[in-house]
Amino acid sequence: MTINNYSSIVKRSLGQDEKVKSVFSLSKIYLNIKMIIAFIKWAIFLALITIVLMLVQENMPEFFNFNRDLNPVYNFSENIAVNDSGSFNFLNLKNGQNINFIEIAIMTYIFIIIPLILFYYLFYLKVSNEFVFTTDRVLIKKGWIGTKTISAKFSRITDVNVSQSLIERILKTGTISINTAGSEGYEVILKHVATPYNLKKDLHNLKERYIQENYGRSFAMSRNA
């Protein structure tokens, strides 16, 4: 995201003189890797289910015999029928005809699984994890339809920690944890962000500038009073 590209939720959360300095989301490398893993997992899952169903069909053909009764008394469509006994024929199969589970699995993967995975990793996770550095604070917006925001004023930030696993160090991603005064543990956590140490440096610079501007102004006003 660019500085000008942030959600209306964030815009409504800004103070009168507060300005956005940086907007980012989950690391692209992290999202791409998770997406590839999801493709592989679902492909393996569908393959295993297909193998099981094919074995059942081979050894228990009567289990998939949808046309074992009388002629259908009512047709919902060309491919769905109900027999007198109430059995369904969803695939318009003839007696003794086997279901092509491989074809069904491939069609399911292409037209259902792939679009859902692409939507989740290329859109939903990005818009549901919006991290913002402003001139006054760190702001996190979570969610897409139902949303919540978490923020930490620079004046209350006491500790900023970066954690990386070995794989995250290789991918140059990590997690930034921010502790604020009066709270136990880390109150604000930015997970799976790119170049976390650079972001920590940017946060430190913004915090120092905020303190100098606000506390310097307060000190000058106290001296003039």
Image (spheres, rainbow, N blue to C red):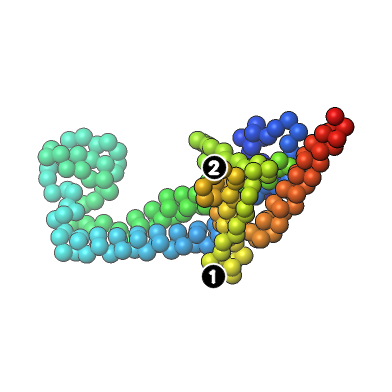
Question: Do we see residue 181 in this rendering?
Answer: yes
In this rendering, does residue 129 appear at all? no
- Residue 133 location in percent, x, y? 68, 46
Q: Which mark is residue 72?
A: none
Residue 71 falls in image quadrant = top left
Which residue is more in the foreground, 27 or 111?
A: 27
Q: Name the residue: 22% across, 45% down.
A: 89
Residue 113 at what x, y percent from top left?
43, 53
Local SS, label 1: helix
Q: Earlier in the sequence, mark 1 or mark 2?
A: 2
Residue in front for this viewpoint, 120 or 8: 8
The answer to which image quadrant residue 166 occupies is bottom right
Residue identifier under label 1: 166
Cβ–Cβ under 8 Å for marks 1 and 2: no
Three-letter code, disc 1? Leu
Residues packed near mark 1 inside 10 Å, few (<14), some (14 to 19) or many (20 plus): few
Frontmost of labels 1 and 2 is 1
Q: As shown in the figure, which amino acid type bears the numbered disc 2?
A: Lys
Q: Is residue 63 left or right of residue 119?
A: left
Q: Secondary structure at mark 2?
A: strand
Residue at image coords 27%, 36%: 76
Q: Which residue is mark 2?
A: 142
The quadrant in which the C terminus is found is: top right
Which x, y percent locates residue 74?
21, 34
